[in-house]
Image: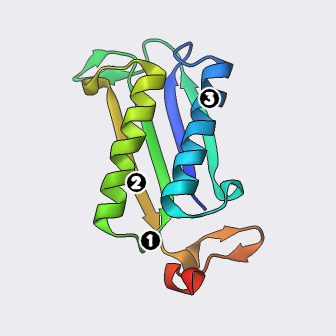
Amino acid sequence: MPLYTVTTQIGVLSAEAKAKLAAEVTTLHSEYSGVPKNWVHIVFQDYPSGSGFTAGLSSATAALILLIRSGRSAEYKSGLVMRLWELLQSATGAADDQIVIGIHEVPPSQAMEMGKIMPELAEQQA
């Protein structure tokens, strides 16, 4: 179920850089959470120069938003965010003040993958 959306200014990430970042994020998520790699989905969105802002000033802001089913601990999510920050910063070269990462959670009963409603985490781990 993990769905990553990575948003950067056009030209910040080449097709090769996107593929490399996608592979790194997929491996990280799979190993960190113990889910198969084919459960990890990543979508890249590019915006034109002059359409990204930090502190009200035009900048090549980089954003990574992760949608996961709820049920993970705060420690799990904090650890994942810190590791994702390193990968995104390495890939984009963005300064700390131009990166934002966030996790959105959805109840498993409100998510589907592979044609099935997602199970609760406890059910999956049983």
Circle 1 or circle 3, nearest the eye:
3
Relative side of 71 to 20, left or right: left
The quadrant in which residue 82 appears is top left
Q: Amino acid at mark 2?
A: Ile
Query: Reading the chain from its start, which is encountered first: label 2 or label 1?
Result: 1
Q: Measured along the vertical axis of the image, is residue 47 above or below residue 120?
A: above
Q: Residues within 10 Å of mark 2 (few under 14, many from 20)?
A: some
Residue displayed at 36% across by 58% down? 77
Q: Viewer-proximal residue, 24 or 41?
A: 24
Residue at image mark 1: 70
Numbered badge on residue 103? 2
N-terminal-most mark, 3 or 2: 3
Q: Residue at x 44, y 31 (%)?
A: 88
Q: Quadrant of the N terminus?
A: bottom right
The kind of secondary structure element at disc 1 is loop
Q: Residue at x 48, y 51 (%)?
A: 66
Q: Position of residue 125 (x, y in %)?
A: 55, 81
Give how far across and how far down residue 17 sits, in percent.
60, 22
Question: Cα distance, mark 1 to mark 3?
Answer: 28 Å
Element type at mark 2: strand
Quote the CA–CA distance across marks 3 and 2.
21 Å
Circle 3: element type = helix
Tag nearer the camera, 3 or 2: 3
> Is 4 left, or right, of 94 in this rendering?
right
- Residue type indicated by callout 1: Ser
Mark 3 residue crowding within 10 angstroms, few (<14) / some (14–19) / many (20+): some
Quarter location, residue 38: bottom right
Residue 20's mark?
3
Residue lying furthest front:
31
Tell me the distance, in whole angstroms, between the alpha carbons under discs 2 and 1: 10 Å
